[in-house]
Image (spheres, rainbow, N blue to C red):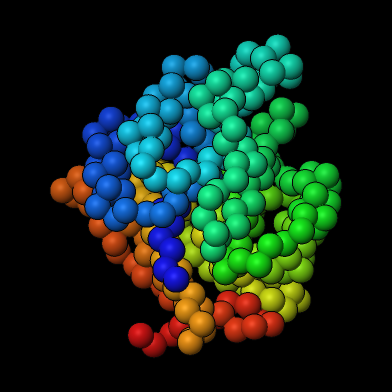
Amino acid sequence: MKIRIAHISDPHFGANNPDVVQSLTTRLLELQPDLIIMTGDITQRARLDQFKAAHAFVESLKQFQWAVVPGNHDIPLYNLSRRFFAPYSHYETAFEGQIEKKIPLEQVQVFTFDSTSRFRLVQGALSQKQIKDLVRKKLIQTDVRIACFHHPVDCPKRVDEKNLLRNRDQVMKVFAETKMDLVLGGHIHDPFVTLSGERYPDIQRQSVISVAGTCLSWRTRAGAPNSFHLIDVDVDPHHQPRMTISRNDLDASGSFSPILVQSFFRQLDLGWSKQENL
Ligand SMILES: [Fe+2]
Ligand SMILES: [Fe+2]
């Protein structure tokens, strides 16, 4: 069984280059993913016209399965009455049914979480209710389990420590218990792939962490142009499950192309490890 996932994040519709939308669409059509996961900051300011542009982009690729979660930019910043009383109204108008959407792929169980809050502008957390619900959920027999939410559980630079999910230690423990394979996030616009054991060495079962960069926004960081991650998972009863993640960057010619590929394999109780020599 092979499953191909495109992990895109932080498009920030309303603060994006329209040409890059076309480049990303072209590349996704070439790659034919089974599933596209978009981990938040869909818009720049949570305005209805920005959600409509995002929705048009999703609709243009509607032959693929989608999972979409909100980011801190998808909650109104200045419209206080909307922010406190109906923070997700525009998101819901455009993406009705996307939170907790059931993905009809038998081999994959996708857990979508909203890590944002109307009371926090930037920082994110999963609520105790979300964590309890996950633990209570009956885990179906499946090949791959994926958790997706906006705020990352690890970052490559010290300056982004403040942007990490607030209750990440508790959440990562629960993810190990629930045998989560992949933990997807965005938010820092700094693409990064790592194993959970790097930051959480006390947790025995390792999952793979994918933090995608910004796929469309102008707000890129040094060394990180617009990008996304392509995740190929291969689960076959005759060998250990394997996964490769390739970072696709927007190059000088205006196309997305792979620049870095990392490979992983899964062992029963230890979870995922890095495949060093390919
Ligand atoms: Fe963002
Ligand atoms: Fe964000």
- Of 200 and 112, nearer the camera is 112
- Residue 20 shows up from this direction: no
Q: Position of residue 87 (x, y in %)?
A: 67, 22
Q: Is residue 79 left or right of residue 230?
A: right
**Quadrant location of the C terminus?**
bottom left
- Of 88 and 83, nearer the camera is 88
Q: Position of residue 103 (x, y in %)?
A: 55, 48
The residue located at (57%, 69%) in the rendering is 143
Q: Is residue 92 above or below residue 193?
A: above
The residue located at (74%, 74%) in the rendering is 203
Q: Is residue 203 above or below residue 24?
A: below
- Residue 200 shows up from this direction: yes
Q: Position of residue 185 (x, y in %)?
A: 56, 51
Q: Is residue 252 left or right of residue 221?
A: left
Q: Is residue 166 above or below residue 74?
A: below
Q: Position of residue 252 (x, y in %)?
A: 19, 49
Q: Quadrant of residue 60?
A: top left
Q: Quadrant of residue 97?
A: top right
